[in-house]
Image (cartoon, helix red, strand yellow):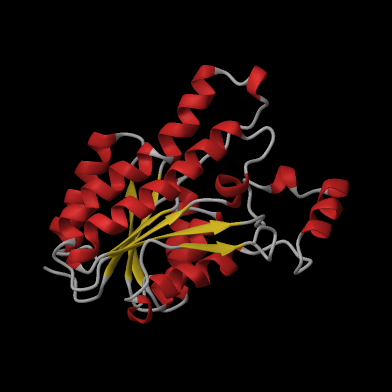
Amino acid sequence: MAETKRVALVTGASRGIGRAIAIALGADGLFVIVNYTANEAAAAETLQKIKDAGGTGTLSRFDVSDAAAVDAAVKQIATEHGRLDVLVNNAGIAIDGLLLRTKKEDWQRTIDVNLPGAFHCCKAASRHLLKSVDGRIVNISSVVGESGNAGQISYAAAKAGLIGMTRSLAKELASRAITVNCVTPGFIETDMTAAHVQGEHREALLKQIPLGRIGSAEDVAEAVRFLVSPRASYITGQVVRVNGGLLM
């Protein structure tokens, strides 16, 4: 039976920014597909939080870097729910290291998840978004994709590529009323950034942020919440910075 609510797929939604986005969209009345790769318990916790907030959803396990797995999962979602209206490409990893110490396999894995992973999801989802009256794609990039950062060459390259992909895809899909935008979070309190925002480094970082605080996952979720809503129907191909003024 076709889902009567708008259906949103949020990748990497078992924790951090992805979890906050999934909860926010669920609270807004969307049926949320909570994607995860390995941690089913964490994904189930996200789903429970969606339900606690009055929302609905389900789990979907697949690795975004596996094109065949993405195709199969998205096809199943469309078959089971009869629609797909929103895609949020949040899944990502960061394997940090200076250039001369970066292993080829670490470079490749970082690129595969962050960039081809989003590509696979966009390609699979677009077929179904074309049938939606208000299709939305939001790609979660990073301030590092705009500014660069020593020790994060792989991550920065992938996230910069995601910005270019966003702008190109926005031009491709605009004629079908599908908007494609990108959100670039600054330093946000998550498991992924924990190592970068501790002790003296945290204090030094706070001095660089005009708003004087590290961001929360909810700060990012609110931007995504707006971009997938009808209120953002005339916004596409844009990069929305959620960084407290770290980069202007």
> Of 213 and 82, which appears nearest the observer?
213
Is 193 displayed left or right of 240 in the figure?
A: right
Residue 93 visible (yes or no): yes
Is 179 displayed left or right of 129 in the figure?
A: right
Q: Is residue 34 above or below residue 152?
A: below
Q: Position of residue 245 (x, y in %)?
A: 69, 64
Quadrant where the N terminus is found in the figure = bottom left
| Residue in view at x 36 percent, y 37 percent | 116
Q: Position of residue 111 (x, y in %)?
A: 45, 33
> Of 135 and 174, which appears nearest the observer?
174
Q: Image quadrant of residue 152?
A: top right
| Residue in view at x 23 percent, y 35 percent | 68
Is 100 displayed left or right of 55 in the figure?
A: right
Is 147 displayed left or right of 84 in the figure?
A: right
Residue 38 visible (yes or no): no
Q: Position of residue 177 (x, y in %)?
A: 22, 69
Q: Position of residue 140 (x, y in %)?
A: 47, 54
Q: Image quadrant of residue 219?
A: bottom right
| Residue in view at x 55 percent, y 65 percent | 220
